[in-house]
Amino acid sequence: MDPGKKAGEGMSKKSKAPPPKSAAGRTTGPSSGGTLAHLVPGARPAVGVRGGAKAAPPTGNPRALAAEGHRHLSKGDVRGAERRFREALSLDDRCAPALAGLGMVAGQAGHLEPAARLFLQAATVEPNQPDHGVNAGSALWRLGQRDTALGVFAETAKRAPRFGRARVAYGTALMEAGRFDDAEAEARAARALDRRDAAALSLLGRVLTRAGRPSEAIAPLEAVAARAKNDPGAANDLAMALSAAGRREEAIAVWQKATERAGTGPGAVELGVNLAGALLAEQRADAAETVLRDLLARVPDHIGARLTLGDALQRQGRFDAARAAFSAVLEREPGNVGALRGLAKSGTVAAGDPMLEALRTAAAEPDQPESARIEILFALGKGLDDAGADPAAVFGALAEANARQGAGRPDDIPARTALVDRSIDVFTPDLFESLAALGNPSERPVFIVGMPRSGTSLVEQMIASHPAAVGAGELGVMPNVERTLREGLGGGYPAGLANVPGPQLADGAARVLAELDAAAQRAGKPEALRVTDKLPDNAMRLGLIALLFPRARVIVCRRDPMDTGLSLFQQNFSDGIPYANGLETIGAAMVQHDRLMAHWRAVLPLWTLTVDYETLVTDLEGEGRRMIDFLGLPWDDAVLRFHETERAVYTASKWQVRQPVFTHSVGRWRRYAKQLEPLRAVLDENGLLDRGV
């Protein structure tokens, strides 16, 4: 987004002329008439030779002519506007309103370099007119000259500290540059000038959201949305903050209402795509598909909607349809990163597949955004692995992807270690006994935990295939409950749990059960006896889970740590699992996980079952019967036909759980033994090589 404007707005101006349509084949060099006619499709020279006779020289007041030009521009008469601006400049080449007007003409035609020059000239002539600086900075920003633009915005705000739009423009640029503290200061300064300034409030909310403080962002964004009920940008900003704050259902409601209000107007498609993304995040792929199908019926060529549809189809296990959606995008944009990644994840890539070369080309593109390059490298690593390429080539792509993703981002091993230490100290048999009466007696919850990539998705898919069970996927409700308790407890977390009020635990349990109930409803099994939450990292929360649900069941998944480590290193977890970007940190996370699981085995007052991945895939029926018996359910052969179960899967295993079980995933690490040596060294040092973790 340009710092000097909100989505859908043009440059700062007195007029609101729409951008002229482009004309194929028109020159972009100076016209023979010496005017800016080359910037305006269909325009003729405003001053010069016409009809074989020289036009009469203009007369009058330059500023009056410039004002007339702005009136023409406000009515959409771009040629008439240019004519008046040029006439004014022929009388006074330092007429700032005319220079700025021609800058708008150039900017609307997409010619940003001359636009920037004209705005800067106007700012030189009228340094105390901040609109010129705001417009110059916006043009420079759109040209990619961000450092120069920041300097122009800063100087403009310094010269006009009481001009709110200059402060907002500078603050927006600072936000886009990642300087959130400085951006917040500018937003608050603009708001102090006018407490009801919607642009300042909006910027403040967006900055706080981007800075990881979405709960603080909600109030200012609610104020903006309440005053601009039909502004899609205001609704979108509020929904983004609500979603980031964990209030996803409220965010979805805001997006839905805004989408209905927008109808087919400006911003409607973008709102719909964001709504679909939020529904996917809430594991409602079918609802997301409905939204996207409606959008694509209106705008069949919208790339974002088509990509999101591919993702929704992929999560539902409809891989042929997903591949068709991604392929349709590639027909329009051959190097589209999202489509290439989606295709790579929608099946197995064969040796010689043209996709591999397409991924290599995209990865080598010098102007590729960093986030896109990371996605491409992970997809390339996956494709090369599928195709049986040389291990060094596979790990070359994966190592670069992980190094880029982890650059400047600290791993979370120290925090995890500290939490494990505190959990071992706090969660004791005495604590569980003293708080046992406060828990909810429901036996519906089943928590499937373990290291990520240890088989949790396969276990859940098998259980979800039983008629009396539902797989809810990786729910975010337990982290949210933990966060609420952390914020409300005195004495810190988890130490403060020793004095937790009963109503707080009851509220947390009710929130979890509501999520499980909703998942059962979505699955068409509202009376299901067991509903699973398979968030692997709930292994860190088993003590809290025991306090909330003393009659819950826990299935602990284990796998050969070398295979788990390889699989973790191959996956693009974005910001979800920071330790996965390094082999040594993966090993360190396993060490802490093993420490905590040993503690839980010793003190946890819950029904617990351990499932080893290697045993599961070699004795599917035996382990399946053991799991179903543990859940207190009668056996059903549908459990063995798990790959036929139609349910959406939202994890990295969405392809694998649709396939019959093969044992080729056991011992995969041996092919990459040389590359995995750093992981092996950590595991060996801690005695974890010879058993599942």
Image: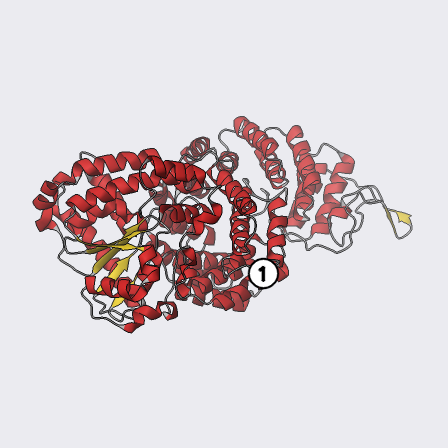
Camera-side residue: 178 or 396?
396
Residue 279 found in image quarter: bottom left
Quarter where residue 565 is shown: top left
Indicate the amino acid at tag 1.
Val
Furthest-right residue in this view: 52
- Classify 443 as above or below 186: below
Q: How is the image coloured?
A: secondary structure
The number of numbered discs placed on residues in the rendered structure image is 1
* Residue 652: % across, % down: 42, 55
Examine the rendering and report whether any part of residue 613 can be seen. yes
Q: Quadrant of the N terminus?
A: top right
Label 1 neighbour load within 10 Å: few <14, some 14-19, many 20+: many
Q: Can you give x and y, in whole percent of width and height, for residue 372 in the image?
A: 54, 47
Q: Name the residue that disc number 1 marks.
A: 329
Disc 1, SS: helix
Regarding residue 470, the answer to whether it shows in the image is no
Residue at left 24%, top 39%? 487
Q: Residue at left 51%, top 39%?
A: 404
Quarter of image, res 340? bottom right
| Depicted 666 relative to depicted 675: above or below | below
Residue 189 higher or lower than 21, as above or below: above
Q: Residue furthest bottom?
A: 637
Q: Position of residue 688 (x, y in %)?
A: 32, 41
What residue do we see at 31% from left, 48% from top?
692
Q: Position of residue 617 (x, y in %)?
A: 35, 60
